[in-house]
Image (cartoon, helix red, strand yellow):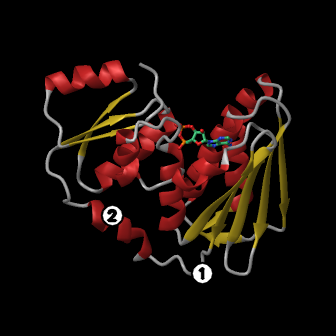
């Protein structure tokens, strides 16, 4: 069904407004002539919400701006912040799909969680591309280009098939962000998995004592 982009953007912004304002940050929306497009309402909102939550989390002062433009094939969404920025050497490692979170873990390098990986997967499931530009001390811009003309039904099944049936048993998810918890649970259920969601390292260890899991998905930077 066609979705109203403006409504989704405003919805996502409403969810972070209180946090932004209590941190003294202004939240600005800039859009021009948004078309009603064919896209998954929940996915587009989730993408924006993840990027906005990070922008609020990693910006000490200044503003967070959301630019939205309709394009010939779809939509460009841009979340710009005046935050701490990301060192260039970290950029290539961010937003890896979550199969590789474990690899990150073994390297014991903090700083890469599930949020961006999910944002990237969601974007790609919708025929889109996520790119990052960042300068330390100046800020970060996340750009999502959704090529909705190319987002066919089959595309959204590609990554599902990869995951489907790859493991047997329950999956333990350790994630402190409520939004991401829901998203991971939904993705796993959709692929026929039983997921046990925990919020912290302590809870995860308790869950591991109770039952066996075939896989643990966890964030690298987490509360104990
Ligand atoms: P998490 O925030 O749970 O660690 P994410 O995947 O959402 O996981 O983000 C990974 C890392 O990328 C963050 O820990 C942070 O270092 C960096 N990051 C993400 N968004 C921003 C941003 N807007 N500004 C600065 N750093 C960011």
Which image quarter holds the C terminus? top left
Q: State how many labels appear.
A: 2
Q: Is residue 120 above or below residue 61?
A: below
Q: Is residue 208 above or below residue 16?
A: above
Q: What residue lies at 18% left-to-right and 38% top-to-bottom? A: 213
Can residue 131 be seen? yes
Q: Is residue 168 above or below residue 64?
A: below
Q: What residue lies at 64% left-to-right and 47% top-to-bottom? A: 51
- Ligand 1's image quarter is top right
User: Dot 1 corresponds to which residue?
Assistant: 149
Spot occupied by residue 186 in the image (x, y as percentages of width and height)? 37, 48
Spot occupied by residue 177 in the image (x, y as percentages of width and height)? 50, 33
User: Dot 2 corresponds to which residue?
Assistant: 160
Q: CA distance from mark 2 to mark 1?
A: 21 Å
Quadrant for residue 171, please give it. Answer: top left
Which image quarter holds the N terminus? bottom right
């Amino acid at each position: 069904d066609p979705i109203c982009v403006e409504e989704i953007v405003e919805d996502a912004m409403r969810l972070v407004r209180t946090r932004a304002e209590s941190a003294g940050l202004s939240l600005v929306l800039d859009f021009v002539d948004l078309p009603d497009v064919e896209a998954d309402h929940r996915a587009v909102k989730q993408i924006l919400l993840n990027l906005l939550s990070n922008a609020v989390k990693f910006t000490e002062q200044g503003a967070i701006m959301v630019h939205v433009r309709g394009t010939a094939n779809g939509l460009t969404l841009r979340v710009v912040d005046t935050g701490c920025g990301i060192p260039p050497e970290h950029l290539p490692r961010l937003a890896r799909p979550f199969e590789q979170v474990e690899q990150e873990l073994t390297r014991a390098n903090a700083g890469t969680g599930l949020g961006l990986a999910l944002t990237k997967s969601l974007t790609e499931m919708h025929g889109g591309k996520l790119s990052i530009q960042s300068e330390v001390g100046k800020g970060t811009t996340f750009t999502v280009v959704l090529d909705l003309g190319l987002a066919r039904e089959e595309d959204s099944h590609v990554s599902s098939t990869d995951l489907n049936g790859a493991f047997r048993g329950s999956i333990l998810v350790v994630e402190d962000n409520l939004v991401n918890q829901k998203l991971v649970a939904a993705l796993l259920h959709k692929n026929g998995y039983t997921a046990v969601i925990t919020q912290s390292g302590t809870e995860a260890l308790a869950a591991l004592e109770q039952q066996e899991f075939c896989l643990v998905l966890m964030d690298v930077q987490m509360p104990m």
